[in-house]
Image (spheres, rainbow, N blue to C red):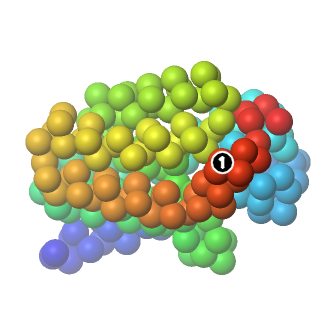
Amino acid sequence: MDLMAVMWVVLAYTLGSVSSAIIVCRLMGLPDPRSEGSGNPGATNVLRIGGKKAAALTLVGDMLKGYLPVALALWFGLDASTVIAIGIAAFVGHLWPVFFGFAGGKGVATELGVLFGLHPVIGALSAAVWLFIAKGLKVSSLAALVAMALAPVFTWYWSGSLVWALGVAAMSLILIWRHKSNIQRLLNGEESALGR
């Protein structure tokens, strides 16, 4: 990876480190999402503590962190390996943000933003799975886990890029690991429903 590619990756990580949840909550006079609700600085927890408007702003902010660097990298004609490295860097920045003591969210919206950046159809397929399950079962974590588990398949099928599919698979595996407490609650039948 050349110096220019490294600079892109560093910038993507830096952008990913900007916590939409914390910024939105501060601007709207809401409690810190790291100390309220589930303690996760993400859109679902912001929905619990601040309502739909705050959650929507958080969701858009977190998606843009993944989308913008990837879309720009493609627009500038960077190679496939560099593009997916940039996406992973933004995702990692959200999970372990340098500006917030390396304590970030679980990465669903940011990975979704990366997927939309790679190709709108890949993002749309993943979002559709999430919406279908979330609306049907009212469990955000389950919807996210299924959607992101399928994301590498969508990426491979639509793009034909093994590098992209492997990069998305790596993000999805990390995301699943970050949801380990949610998975345990799902197995125990204790996971909170959306809106509760």
Residue drawn at the location 87% of the way across and 48% of the way down = 30
Q: Is residue 138 above or below residue 91?
A: above
Quarter of image, res 19: bottom right
Split into 4 quadrants, where in the image is the C terminus? top right
Position of the N terminus, as image quadrant, is bottom left
Crowding near pointer 1: few (<14 within 10 Å), some, many (20+)? some
Residue 117, located in which quarter of the rendered image? top left
Q: How many marks can you see? A: 1
* Frontmost residue, 110 versus 13: 110
Q: Which is nearer the eye, 7 or 126?
A: 126
User: Residue, x 43% and y 49% (percent of image)?
Assistant: 111
Q: Residue at x 26, y 42 (%)?
A: 153
Q: Is residue 29 above or below residue 184?
A: above
Left or right for 188, reference 123: right
| Apparent side of residue 3 relative to residue 144 in the rendered image (left or right) | left
Image location of residue 130, percent across then percent down: 50, 32
Q: Looking at numbered disc 1 in the image, what kind of residue is underneath it?
A: Leu
Q: Residue most toward the front?
A: 188
Percent coordinates x, y for residue 60 in the rendering: 56, 38
Q: Which residue is mark 1?
A: 186
Which of the pair 8/66 is nearer the observer?
Answer: 66
Dot 1 falls on a residue whose secondary structure is helix
Q: Is residue 99 above or below residue 39?
A: below
The image shows residue 127 at horizontal and vertical percentages of: 45, 31
Left or right for 5, reference 31: left
Residue 47 in view:
yes
Residue 26 visible in this rendered orientation of the protein: no
Residue at figure coordinates x 40%, y 34% from the top left: 126
Residue 22 on image: x %, y %: 72, 56
179 sits to left or right of 195 = left
